[in-house]
Each structure stands twice: as C-alpha cells, then as structure tokens.
Image (cartoon, helix red, strand yellow):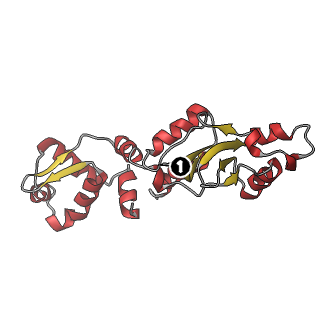
C-alpha cells in the first residue's frame, strides 16, 4: 500500500472545498467533474486533485460517461473497511523457534535473547509441534535445578490445543484470536503433506504496529 493511498484512505478531516464537493455530489449525483467545477466557479483542472483524493478515499465513486456519486460512507466506516482488508502475510514477522529436543534452559535463553513472549516448537521439517509461553517456562523452572536436562516437548502445549492462523487470514481475525484466547502470539502456518509448516508469527505487538501505522500515516 503506497503512502499516498494510506494517507488518503485514513484522512478523516477534509478541506472546506472537499466538503463542498461532497455536498454537491450528495444533492446532485451522478454529476460530472465539469458540472461540479461550474457550481464552485472553478476550473476542472483545479478540482482534479480534490476529486482524486475523495475518490481514492472512498467518499465518492465515479463511472465513465456518468460522473461522480456519493458512496454514503463516513470516514470511520471507510477506515473500518480498510482495516478489514489487511492480511496476515502483510504484517507477519519471522517466527522464533526451538527444536523439540531443546532443553528448558535453552528455551529460556532463547526467549530472553530474542525478547519474545512465545516460542514455537518445531520438528526436523520445521513443522509446528508445540508452543511455549513465559508461563510454561516459569512453571517448569520453579523448584527445578537441572533445567538443561528437561526437554521442552514435555512442557509445551501441543496440537490440537494450539491456536494458529494462515497467511491469507485477515488481520482482524488474527487479532480476535489473540483476544479470545488471551495469548501473546499466533504461529502463521502453511499446510503441507508433512504437517503444519511454520512460516511466520503474529503478536500483540504486531497488532499495535498496525494501528500506530494507520495513525501516523495521517500526519
């Protein structure tokens, strides 16, 4: 998504002239660009940038040889529609994984060094077999002195108790899973004959970045 399109789609406050254009189209649409310009005592060339912005933002729609007409949607509705188009593959990050045979000590070290809240456990084919949370590792650590002797596959959460998502899933659906399951991260998987190959991750931080990007692009 280009910066221009992102900025236009999320722009809620319009200029006075753009508000005037919307009102004219509301009352008279479909109406041509020349007719709008005539009502405002301006040239068609002068209005072209405003019409382009309003069309790209979704406030207006246009049809060849027909003209412009009002879509009837508010800025909030247009923003909501845009958010609902975001796909997981656009925002997924590299998954942090450990092998099934790794020790709890190794997993704790990896979680600390990578600064993540969730580790994904994989087999030799990079297929997802388990998930480790901070709570899992903390629980395993309490009262145990030999953490390097405990393999993670003993304490990890296994399928089918792992919540997953796919590359083409909507970000809003991934966010809902994080909230509903009260978890920090989701593995992004690709279905293969050998199992569920992990190809990415979506976290609460990812969701936060999406909304920060939406807000910052408006400035």
- Please tell me whether mark 1 sits on a helix, a strand or a loop: loop
Q: Position of residue 57 (x, y in %)?
A: 31, 53
Q: How many marks?
A: 1
Q: In this image, 149 relative to 51: left or right?
A: right
Q: Position of residue 169 (x, y in %)?
A: 44, 45
Q: Where is mark 1, residue-wise?
A: 194
Q: Position of residue 38 (x, y in %)?
A: 10, 58
| Observer-nearest of 173 and 132 | 132
Which residue is at 77% across, 54% downward?
112
Q: Is residue 72 above or below residue 200?
A: above
Residue 103 seen in the current view: yes
Q: Residue furthest left?
A: 65
- Assess disc 1: are there few (<14), some (14-19) or many (≥20) residues with their C-alpha within 10 Å of its C-alpha: few
Please identify the quadrant where the N terminus is shown: bottom left
Which residue is at 49% across, 52% downward?
215
Could you say which quadrant of the image residue 156 lies in? top right
| Observer-nearest of 200 and 85 | 200
Q: Is residue 165 above or below residue 54?
A: above
Which residue is at 58% across, 34% downward?
160
Q: Residue furthest front?
A: 193
Residue 11 seen in the current view: no
Q: Position of residue 188 (x, y in %)?
A: 53, 48
Q: In this image, 191 relative to 130: left or right?
A: left
Q: Is residue 117 above or below residue 36?
A: above
Q: In this image, 109 relative to 94: left or right?
A: right
| Observer-nearest of 93 and 126 | 126
| Observer-nearest of 131 and 91 | 131
Which residue is at 13% across, 58% downward?
33
């Amino acid at each position: 998504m280009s910066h221009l399109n992102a900025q236009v789609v999320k722009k809620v406050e319009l200029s006075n002239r753009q508000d005037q254009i919307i009102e004219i189209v509301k009352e008279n649409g479909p109406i041509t660009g020349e007719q709008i310009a005539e009502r405002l005592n301006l040239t068609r060339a002068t209005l072209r940038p405003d019409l382009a912005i309003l069309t790209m933002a979704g406030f207006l729609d246009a049809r060849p040889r027909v003209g412009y007409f009002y879509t009837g949607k508010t800025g909030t509705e247009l923003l909501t529609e845009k958010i609902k188009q975001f796909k997981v593959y656009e925002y997924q990050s590299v998954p942090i994984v450990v092998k099934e045979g790794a020790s709890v000590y190794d997993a704790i070290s990896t979680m600390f060094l990578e600064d993540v809240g969730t580790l994904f456990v994989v087999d030799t084919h990079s297929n997802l077999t388990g998930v480790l949370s901070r709570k899992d590792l903390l629980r395993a650590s309490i009262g145990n002195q030999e953490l390097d002797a405990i393999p993670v596959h003993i304490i990890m959460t296994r399928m089918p108790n792992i919540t997953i998502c796919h590359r083409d899933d909507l970000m809003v659906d991934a966010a809902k899973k994080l909230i509903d399951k009260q978890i920090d991260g989701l593995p992004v998987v690709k279905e293969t004959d050998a199992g569920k190959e992990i190809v990415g991750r979506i976290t609460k931080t990812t969701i936060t970045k999406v909304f920060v990007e939406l807000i910052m692009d408006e400035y």
